[in-house]
């Protein structure tokens, strides 16, 4: 609360761009600002609730990349390009993160409590009922994602994603507050890992998912082998037949 009080009293509040300052300035359609308790809860959501989920998403990204050598090679080159200021590098790393969250969503469903009766697929559901959309089945729908079991970040380049087709953060008014922050954090950490160490690829089967609380994490902890790598981009390699279609 002391940090919140300091931010409220800051004479330069209007110019500050940190998360707390933006939350202090935020107001709803009626002009109401959040009180101190609401601000504290939002900060806890961003900083605490997002820790395990983002860390798990990064674990899955590394687990996927080590099983898809050509994607890994492109991601390493993209990491160096991103560090050099090339927007194309950022775009590909962003696509890797999005495709990771498609094939390995960190949470398995998103629940909502009905505020009024609704009919779904012929079933009449009363107000007060909890309904939950399964994220995995949506992300694995061939109608939305051709060859859905394939890990292919290219499909995310220039893709138009909607809250009903790509929903690792849920959707609607209750969409995860930290979605944007999580994506930026994930991309930056992935970039620095790929620049600073060399991930060793493997032909071992992908790790199965296991449930821990509400999180879907790698059963064996996303074990990888790595070597220290120089901070220089690798040489381009010619694609090998069939690798691009490697299954998830």
Image: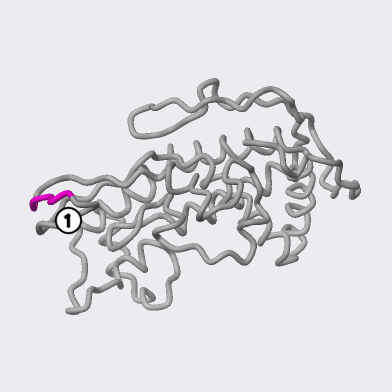
- Residue 212, quarter of the rendered image: top left
Q: State the residue at coordinates (39%, 27%).
A: 211
- Tell me which corner region of the image, top left, top right, bottom left or bottom right, holds residue 73: top right
Task: Give the residue number, with chain letter if any, for mark 1.
Answer: 119
Q: Nearer the viewer, residue 25 or 189?
A: 189
Residue at 70%, 67% in the rendered image: 87
Q: Residue 46 versus residue 205: which sits nearer the camera?
A: 205
At which x and y percent is residue 34?
21, 65
| Image spot of residue 51 (x, y percent) | 43, 41
Rendered position, 128 above or below 17: above
Q: Nearer the viewer, residue 222 or 99?
A: 99
Residue 25 shown left or right of residue 219 in the figure: left
Is 197 colored magenta in this rendering?
Answer: no
Which is more toward the observer, 214 or 119?
119
Residue 12 rendering spot, x and y as whole percentages: 39, 76
In the rendered structure, the answer to whether residue 150 lies left or right of residue 45 reads right
Element at label 1: strand
Main SS type for the magenta part? strand
User: From which residue to which does the magenta span run?
Assistant: 123-127
Image quadrant in which the C terminus is located: top right
Image: 245 above or below 63: below
Q: So how many labels did they put on this image?
A: 1
Which residue shows up at 81% across the image and 37% down it?
Answer: 229
Compared to residue 246, the image places residue 203 above or below, namely above
Which residue lies most toward the front here? 122
Q: Where is residue 170 in the image (x, y as percent from the top left)?
A: 36, 53
Mark 1, other Cα within 10 Å: few <14 / some 14–19 / many ≥20? few
């Amino acid at each position: 609360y002391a940090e919140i009080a300091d931010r409220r009293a800051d004479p330069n509040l209007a110019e500050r761009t940190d998360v707390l300052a933006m939350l202090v300035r935020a107001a709803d359609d009626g002009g109401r600002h959040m009180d101190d308790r609401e601000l504290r809860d939002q900060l806890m959501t961003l900083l605490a609730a997002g820790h395990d989920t983002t860390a798990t998403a990064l674990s899955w990204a590394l687990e996927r990349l080590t099983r898809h050598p050509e994607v890994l090679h492109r991601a390493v080159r993209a990491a160096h390009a991103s560090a050099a200021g090339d927007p194309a590098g950022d775009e590909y790393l962003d696509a890797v993160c999005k495709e990771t969250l498609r094939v390995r969503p960190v949470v398995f469903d998103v629940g909502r409590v009905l505020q009024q009766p609704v009919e779904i697929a012929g079933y009449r559901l009363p107000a007060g009922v909890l309904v939950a959309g399964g994220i995995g089945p949506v992300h694995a729908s061939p109608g939305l994602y051709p060859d859905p079991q394939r890990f292919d970040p290219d499909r995310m380049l220039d893709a138009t994603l909607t809250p009903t087709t790509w929903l690792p953060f849920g959707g609607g008014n209750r969409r995860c507050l930290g979605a944007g922050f999580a994506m930026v954090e994930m991309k930056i950490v992935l970039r620095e890992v790929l620049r600073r160490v060399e991930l060793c690829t493997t032909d071992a089967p992908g790790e199965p998912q296991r449930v821990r609380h509400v999180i879907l994490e790698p059963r064996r902890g996303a074990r990888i082998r790595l070597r220290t790598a120089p901070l220089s981009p690798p040489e381009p390699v010619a694609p090998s037949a069939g690798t691009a279609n490697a299954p998830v």
